[in-house]
């Protein structure tokens, strides 16, 4: 069976239905899965309760992964089935939360002669009246604002011992907001590790979990402390196995997503208390962003080489009746990363990071790197105006702090200028804007270039 095909009802009735359905979770869900077409025969009642629950769970996973609930492909009997037999929720009830849920797979070491097996944990952003926490040890401080739904192997009826499920739960919680990560995490990875609530991945016992490498093609993600031991044991069962090590949630998410930046939708900033802006040699980009954003205060950071530009910009904004903002200036070195970062971080820390922005369009590369490090330390948003960007378009990079400090990125379009018709945006946005030759322009020349 491949990812495009569900096992027929006849196959389920004649063979090991639970095994065949369990193997369906080893494939990425397909839009072509049609449960109504496959399982509308009256003979579905011959399936045992466990197989019916797995079918319902498979439909739930399809809805979560595809971010689409396809009721027209679900028979009414299946909607009434409980995907998690230890809970009272039907598939119909859980589908209401499919748009805000994710799933991850984690290994369970076998005990009392049982083999190791894979289990699945679902994280729902909505807090249900009951969930699977009673089956999980050490669940008090993990995803406390979410619901945890666990599908353990059939032999595991008792509470699951240990903390190796925690990394899977934390990663599923992160994946709720990222559909691509939801699919990759639930379909292609097996995750094992404990978490401390601070973003660190802690060691867990391996037991006989490495035996699973011979029974699944999933990538493995384990704590850094046990990586070598697990990788050697897994390779003995499957030489082609891929095992990755993580010491933090950030590392784990980067492995699964295959890149380290979240794409996110942002609203254009409309109430900015202060815009921290680097000053380079070019004037148009140093003018366009403040005119677009209209912050209450503009802090210009210049190097010894760009002090004339900073002075001219300060005079330009102080001279304007159409733009009311306070302008301050601060010198930082353009050839000393550590010192620049400290100075900027101290300056950024004096303002509320929630209402401040950092503009890295100007300055040299070292100043930009220092500003990025300082913004990251303060959990701030940065903006950048590319020379080839569309009119009124800015790039946003958000370093809002959390357990996973991956930056979030997206483009925004907007214009807060109170009199945009008076601005010569063609001069400010042109891919090859007119440059003044010789010395810097006078204030009058700059006014003439910018204002219509």
Image (tube, rainbow, N blue to C red):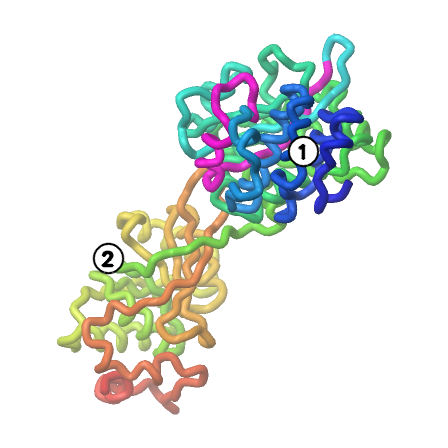
Residue at numbered disc 1: 190
The residue sitting at the left extreme is 321
Q: Quadrant of residue 153?
A: top right
The verdict on residue 97 being magenta is yes
Magenta segment boundaries in residue numbering? 83-110
Tell me where residue 379 appears, x and y as whole percent: 39, 46
Whichever of callouts 2 and 1 sits on the residue coming sooner in the sequence is 1
Q: Quadrant of residue 332?
A: bottom left
* Secondary element at tag 2: loop
Numbered label tally: 2
Which is nearer the eye, 162 or 312? 162
Left or right: residue 375 compared with residue 32? left
Q: Is residue 17 left or right of residue 279?
A: right
437 sits left or right of 366 in the view: left
Question: Residue extending furthest front?
Answer: 42
Residue shown at 57% from the left, 28% from the top: 121
Visible residue check, residue 110: yes
Q: Is residue 263 left or right of residue 162?
A: left
- Estimate the x, y position of residue 305 in percent, counting from the top left: 39, 74
Q: Quadrant of the C terminus?
A: bottom left
Q: Residue at x 60, y 47 (%)?
A: 257
Q: Is residue 192 visible?
A: no
The residue sitting at 32% across, 81% down in the picture is: 425
- Label 2 belongs to which residue? 271
Give the SS element for disc 1.
strand
Does the magenta portion include 86?
yes
For the residue pair 262 and 284, the one nearer the viewer reads as 262
Q: Position of residue 366 (x, y in %)?
A: 48, 63
Q: Please state which of the two labelled residues, at mark 2 or mark 1, is closer to the viewer.
A: 1
Q: Residues within 10 Å of mark 2 (few under 14, many from 20)?
A: few
């Amino acid at each position: 069976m491949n990812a495009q095909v569900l096992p027929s009802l006849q196959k389920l009735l004649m063979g090991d239905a639970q095994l065949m359905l369990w193997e369906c979770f080893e494939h990425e869900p397909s839009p072509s899965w049609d449960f109504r077409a496959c399982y509308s025969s009256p003979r579905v009642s011959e399936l045992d309760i466990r197989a019916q629950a797995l079918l319902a769970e498979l439909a739930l996973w399809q809805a979560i992964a595809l971010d689409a609930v396809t009721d027209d492909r679900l028979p009414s009997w299946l909607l009434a089935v409980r995907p998690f037999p230890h809970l009272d929720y039907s598939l119909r009830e859980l589908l209401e939360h499919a748009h805000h849920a994710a799933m991850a797979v984690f290994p369970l070491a076998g005990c009392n002669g049982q083999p190791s097996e894979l289990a699945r944990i679902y994280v729902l952003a909505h807090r249900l009246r009951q969930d699977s926490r009673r089956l999980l040890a050490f669940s008090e401080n993990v995803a406390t604002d979410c619901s945890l739904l666990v599908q353990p192997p059939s032999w595991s009826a008792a509470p699951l011992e240990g903390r190796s499920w925690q990394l899977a739960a934390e990663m599923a919680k992160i994946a709720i907001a990222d559909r691509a990560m939801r699919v990759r995490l639930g379909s292609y990875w097996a995750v094992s590790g404990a978490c401390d609530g601070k973003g660190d991945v802690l060691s867990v016992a391996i037991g006989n979990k490495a035996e699973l490498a011979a029974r699944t093609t999933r990538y493995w993600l384990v704590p850094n402390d046990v990586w070598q031991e697990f990788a050697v044991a897994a390779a003995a069962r499957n030489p082609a196995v891929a095992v990755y090590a993580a010491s933090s949630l950030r590392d784990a998410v980067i492995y699964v997503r295959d890149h380290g930046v979240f794409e996110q939708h942002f609203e254009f900033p409309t109430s900015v208390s202060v815009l921290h802006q680097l000053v380079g040699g070019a004037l148009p980009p140093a003018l366009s962003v403040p005119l677009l954003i209209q912050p209450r205060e503009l802090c210009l950071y210049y190097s010894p080489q760009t002090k004339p530009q900073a002075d001219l910009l300060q005079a330009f904004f102080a001279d304007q009746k159409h733009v009311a903002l306070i302008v301050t200036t601060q010198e930082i070195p353009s050839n000393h990363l550590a010192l620049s970062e400290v100075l900027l971080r101290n300056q950024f820390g004096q303002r509320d990071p929630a209402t401040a922005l950092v503009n890295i369009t100007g300055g040299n590369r070292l100043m930009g790197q220092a500003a990025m490090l300082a913004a990251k330390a303060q959990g701030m948003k940065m903006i950048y105006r590319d020379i080839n960007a569309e009119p009124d378009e800015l790039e946003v990079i958000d370093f809002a702090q959390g357990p996973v400090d991956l930056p979030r990125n997206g483009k925004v379009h907007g214009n807060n200028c109170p009199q945009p018709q008076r601005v010569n945006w063609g001069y400010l946005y042109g891919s090859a804007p007119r440059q003044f030759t010789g010395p810097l322009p006078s204030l009058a020349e700059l006014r003439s270039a910018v204002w219509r």
